[in-house]
Image (cartoon, rainbow, N blue to C red):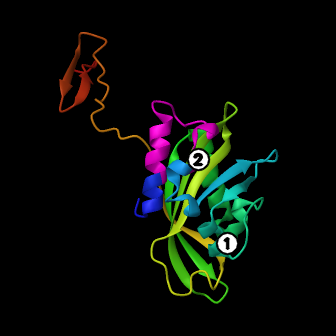
């Protein structure tokens, strides 16, 4: 994660969730993430499975030159990237895991800016599919940003984010029979050929 808003929201989300897969929506206090609030948004899944903006920070809205509330998340993406955007949302909801992505935003005149996207799951009334919180922030602000609205987004890269697995020992399987021996990390069973 490169952007300070992304780092701040992820750290707060991680703290709020504790040992659980995701925190409850009601546990998120806007004042605790005030430095990244303008770059943040909350998505809500509708009955037909579409994710719409429930809230969007002022800097997110200014990227597109309009209020994003109630707008579908996938409408911000270019035609060729809409399915990928829906897949990212499905991964976050189904795997209850966060995703950080590199995104390019392009204006109608062809100007481009690199953005960082963070999507994190939130539980809402017992469901992990109902809400997602995220950040969409430019990595560097070109002079035209805010004056020329972005027309569409394109996905460049993405990766899962979550708790570190450092220090978690690998599971070791023991031989179930007497004729097995370990060789270079593999379990070798003596067969019927001599």
* Residue lying at the far top of the rendered structure: 178
SS type, badge 2:
helix
Picture coordinates of residue 151 (x, y %)?
Answer: 68, 78
x then y, percent, for residue 52: 74, 55
Q: Which quadrant is the N terminus positioned in?
A: bottom left
Residue drawn 81% across the image and 44% down it: 47
Q: Out of 161 and 185, give the one closest to the viewer.
A: 161
Q: Which residue is mark 2?
A: 91
Q: Which residues are magenta?
A: 9-30
Residue 23 colored in magenta in the image? yes
Question: Residue at position x 76%, y 62% from top?
Answer: 71
Is 17 a magenta residue?
yes
Above or below, 28 relative to 190: below
- Which residue is the extreme one toward the bottom? 109
Q: Which mark is residue 109?
A: none
Q: Does the CB distance between marks 2 and 1 fall below 8 Å?
A: no
- Residue 14 can be seen in this image: yes
x and y percentages locating residue 178 in the rendered image: 24, 9
Looking at the picture, tell me which residue is in the foreground, 151 or 23.
23
In the rendered image, the quadrant that contains the C terminus is top left
Expressed as whole percent of the image width and height from the top left, the position of residue 10 reads 46, 50
Q: Which residue is mark 1?
A: 78
Name the residue: 71% across, 57% down: 53
In this view, the residue in front, 81 or 178, is 81
Q: Earlier in the sequence, mark 2 or mark 1?
A: 1
- Crowdedness of circle 2 by 10 Å Cα count: few (<14), some, many (20+)? some
3D distance between C-alphas at marks 2 and 1? 20 Å
Q: Secondary structure at mark 1?
A: loop
């Amino acid at each position: 994660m490169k952007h300070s808003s992304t780092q701040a929201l992820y750290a707060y989300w991680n703290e709020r969730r504790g040992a659980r897969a995701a925190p409850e929506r009601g546990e998120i206090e806007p004042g605790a993430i005030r430095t990244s609030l303008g770059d943040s948004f909350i998505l809500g899944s509708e009955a037909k499975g579409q994710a719409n903006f429930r809230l969007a920070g002022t800097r997110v809205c200014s990227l597109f030159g309009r209020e994003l509330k109630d707008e579908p998340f996938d409408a911000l993406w270019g035609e060729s990237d809409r399915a990928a955007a829906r897949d990212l949302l499905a991964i976050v909801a189904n795997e209850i895991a966060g995703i950080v992505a590199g995104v390019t935003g392009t204006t109608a005149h062809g100007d481009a800016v690199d953005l960082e996207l963070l999507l994190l799951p939130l539980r809402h009334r017992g469901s992990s599919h109902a809400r997602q919180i995220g950040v969409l922030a430019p990595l560097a602000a070109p002079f035209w940003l805010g004056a020329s609205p972005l027309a569409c987004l394109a996905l460049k890269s993405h990766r899962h984010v979550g708790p570190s697995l450092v220090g978690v020992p690998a599971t070791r399987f023991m031989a179930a029979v007497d004729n097995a021996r370990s060789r270079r990390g593999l379990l070798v069973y003596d067969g019927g050929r001599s």
